[in-house]
Image (tube, rainbow, N blue to C red):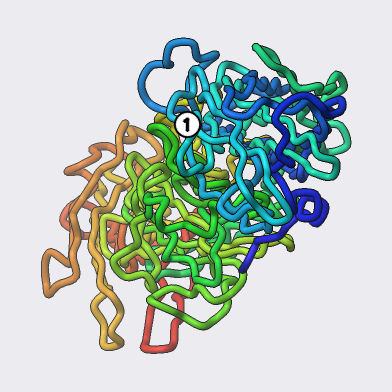
Amino acid sequence: MNFRRWITALAVVTLFVGLAAAQTSGGGTALTCNTVAQVTPTIRSEGLTEEVGDIVITCQGGTYVALNTAIPQGNIVISLTAPVTSRLASGSAPAGAAGQPSEAILMVDEPNSGLAGPVPGFGPGASLSVCPTPGTGCTEYATSVAGTGGNYVVATNAQNPGTPAPGYNVFQGNVSGNTVSFQGIPFLPPVTNGVVRVYRITNIRVNATGAGSSVVSGVQPVYAYISTNGASTLPINSANGITVGFVSTSLNPSVTNAKTAFTQCLGQTQATVATLNFADTFPSAFKTRIAPFGTTGTSYIGTSSAAAYPQQSIPGQLYGSESNFILPVNGVQAGLADFGTRFQAVFNNLPSGATIYVSPINTNAGTGVQGGYNIVEPAIALLTTGGATGVFTAPSNPTANFPLTPVSGSATAVWEVVNNNTSANVNFQFGVYITYATNNPPVPASTGSPTVTLSYAPISSTGSASSSANIPRFILGANSTAQAINVTVGPCQTLLLFPYVTSQGGFDTGIAISNTSMDPWGTATSSGTCSLYFYGQNQLTAPLVVGPIAPGNPNPALSAFTTSSVAPNFEGYVIAVCNFQFAHGFAFVSDIGARNLAMGYLPLIITNGATQQNFRGNGANVGAEILEN
């Protein structure tokens, strides 16, 4: 998708930008300047590094500067109503700087734009040239050069140059708190009627999270106030400020649950559990790392070289990406984000003994696969195994659902947007799946109900400008709360009730429990212990544990004992909780030695209202034993 778009008015007024008809002294009119925001984007209230719109200052008129003399210099200061978080250059601030040099830049006369001008190689036809001293700016000189229709005064870096070359036209901003200062900017008045000088300020990022409850009707404006000072000034009146962005909540996450309960008696292989939904509230909320100029997404993942992005170093364009105007400037890669918009799902209270999988690509991405990924549909996000802050790392098998590795019941999955249509709303959907076996010990219950928290990534507490913190970075938004995943895996159990058991008055009860999961129908066998709970006179204070009872012939498929040997002088009933399917039992009550009275019975198979039990698989057919309640 091509996000390039010119602002028509600027294309017209900058036709002869940066040039003035040559005069040697005197003359001119009053210098007038106008300040506008090129666009007023909607920015994310969850974002700590949100791009505001470019600020464009256009000036006309003024007094001629004598040839071969230094052009008057001044400072341009931008004060915003939110903390500035543009990336800082590493190291200490240079002497004289009004803050730390940053990726915020000011460009004079739209260099590298390709717009027409009367002097080839100057103004909009000049290459990008960065002033190397952001603390003090750079001295430039007025020089006369020949162009279409006559001679023109232009700025050069040398006094009386033999062959005039364009002066510096890119100046680095110094960030301090809510302000960006551009120091020592040469103010060469355009003088000639109809000629306009343009100062474009770009790559300003702000912490938009402060809007919070102050958002009115869904949006809160961010204002910029522009002033000039120093040896020379520009006549700028921004007492009321200009609007450079509207803050709005951008992410509306939700969970669609697919199934609520499973039983371990029937093993599952990537059974669908839920769908995770990351929906935007305005179309430009989700962005690729850079604008995909006619090339599909994976080419732009993990690349740090600005040389890879020549399309994103042309002033006046709208890129619709996390990156803005990309250019290396004095120790900082201006404009380049670390990655595209990332989503994360943080799972908690996952049941151990089971594996949770997520889809590596949004499930509503369509068909067509390229290079293992579908990157031909408008909205694509891919799983990265490098975590929330790492360089994008694809799974080893990008077409297979990816297993998460829980630690203490918690796990995190992260996806990155690699292709999107920023002119339409989108909902990125990712599947959640569960796999577990029919073996024992059973999948134990989690420490609580499984939950997932959906948000942007990475989550950060760095709300001020930084040289090392990631761009973009976010906070947990108001909508990013823990949501339930209604998945439970009931243990594979059989519950047996022995309604009358005694070892009193010269009687005793023999109890036998067998594991009958071996059968002619290919049922998955299981084994485990049985915990027997005694209720009645002289009951045991703790359950009696027998086993493990494993399928086999004859033992250890059978556990048998007399009540008198484990609970002397007991009378009541016994409930056996056996951690395997198809447990069956027999009780035999008789006088000692079974000489006079004897009776045998089968225990009742009961349910506790939650445990699903005794399912038997027979190829494609699945049946269940009849349960008595």
Kind of residue at disc 1:
Ala
What secondary structure is found at the residue carrying circle 1? loop
Of residues 528 and 349, the one nearer the viewer is 349
**Relative to 617, 289 lies left or right:** right
**Relative to 160, 582 lies left or right:** left
Q: Is residue 148 above or below residue 1?
A: above
Residue at point 44%, 31% (across, down)? 469
Residue at point 83%, 29% (across, down)? 28
Residue at point 45%, 40% (across, down)? 162
Residue 129, visible in the rendered structure: yes
Of residues 491 and 537, the one nearer the viewer is 491
Q: Is residue 44 above or below residue 391?
A: above
Answer few, some or many: residues within 10 Å of disc 1's Cα (few below 14, many 20 plus, some between 14 and 19). many
The C terminus - image quarter: bottom right
Of residues 1 and 381, the one nearer the viewer is 1
Residue at point 44%, 82% (across, down)? 622
Residue 40, visible in the rendered structure: no
Image location of residue 217, percent across then percent down = 88, 37
Image location of residue 593, percent across then percent down = 16, 56
Q: Is residue 248 above or below residue 589?
A: above
The N terminus - image quarter: bottom right
Q: How many marks do you count on the picture?
A: 1
- The answer to which image quadrant residue 512 occupies is bottom left
Image location of residue 543, percent across then percent down = 30, 40
- The answer to which image quadrant residue 549 occupies is bottom left
Of residues 460 and 405, the one nearer the viewer is 460
**Which residue position holds label 1?**
158
Image location of residue 481, percent across then percent down = 62, 39
